[in-house]
Image: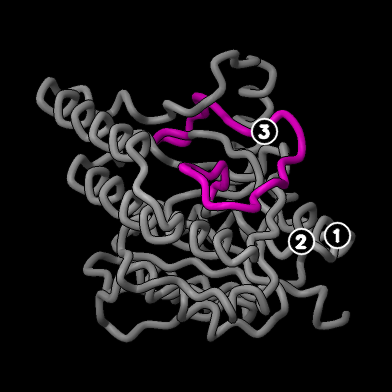
Amino acid sequence: MKNHDYISIGIPFYNTEEYLEHAIASVIAQTHKNWELILIDDGSTDGSLEVAKDFAKLDNRIRVISDGQNKKLPYRLNQIIDESKYCYIARMDADDLIHPTRLEKQLKFLIENPNFDLVSSGLVSIDNNNNVYGYRSPSSLNVDFNKVNLSYPINHATILVRKEWYQRNKYNVNYPRSQDYELWCRTSSNKDLAVAILPDLLYYYREEGLINSKKLIESYNAGLKAYSQYSHKYSLKKFTTMQLKKTVVTLLERFGQLQLLAGRRNSENIEPSIIKEHQQVIDNLLINTRVGK
């Protein structure tokens, strides 16, 4: 196979022992088999590193990198770019799952559409017990990002990217929060965000139970900073929206209802057949998850 048929998949992890093996198993289950999986430990103190090493012993496509330090996500994402061997790089979070056809479909799109550097997809929301409770995606292919926007419908963890784009557009390590939004603002301001968002539901995103008010507020503040920097203007709408979000987060936390924000962007009209279809995919993925099975 030619080099361009291969994909480097990067999963940075920090204390995700409970879910990491599921994430790795969903990569191994991909219909596209030409990949390397880079597992980068960000100073975990639980058993995550051992889980990663156990999988690496069983599959020579998997390699583990660990320096024992906690350098935060943007640093690790840049490390994945530098460590990657192949012309395409896929993002994934350590507590999520991916649909078996994710790599196949996204790679096919980029090969057939050379004018695009990135491709994202729709996602399915799952809870801590791997139960599907919602989903979201564009109704059709979404490709218009020629200016700095107040928000971007790009699901960061779902992207497949040409390595050459990543090499000229690294993550800003000064944004431990909202590093993706900062990247979208910066690259769109430079007319260098040629991204397509597929309507296909190819990613299983674990968001219920993981919401933290401090992290949310930090992300809102970072988002406002990035927008102001790259749009070269002050936005009263952006400022008001961020202040409103922070107020809502504070109130929800006060009344113990912060988890209501999980999946808030999901489609309002949920089709039971879609929920059933993806629940079955997830159940099948988890059957043989444990190392050695």
Residue at screen point 64% across, 66% down:
192
Q: Quadrant of the N terminus?
A: bottom right
Q: Which mark is residue 113?
A: 1
Magenta stretch bounds:
126-155
Residue 138's disc is 3
Q: Tell me what residue is drawn at x 59 percent, y 16 percent.
A: 270
The residue drawn where x is 68% and y is 55% is: 195
Q: Residues within 10 Å of mark 1 (few under 14, many from 20)?
A: few
Q: Is residue 232 left or right of residue 98?
A: left
The mark that comes first in sequence, 1 or 3, is 1
**Left or right side of 113 for 200:** left
Q: Please name whichever residue, 18 or 222, is drawn nearer the observer in this view of the structure.
A: 222
Camera sees residue 36 = yes
Q: Amino acid at mark 3?
A: Pro
**Could you say where residue 276 lies in the image, as x and y percent from the top left?**
64, 22
Marks 2/3 in contact by CB < 8 Å: the verdict is no
* Distance between the alpha carbons at the discs numbered 2 and 1: 6 Å
Q: Nearer the viewer, residue 125 or 184?
A: 184
245 vs 36: above or below: above
Reading the image, the residue beneath label 2 is 116
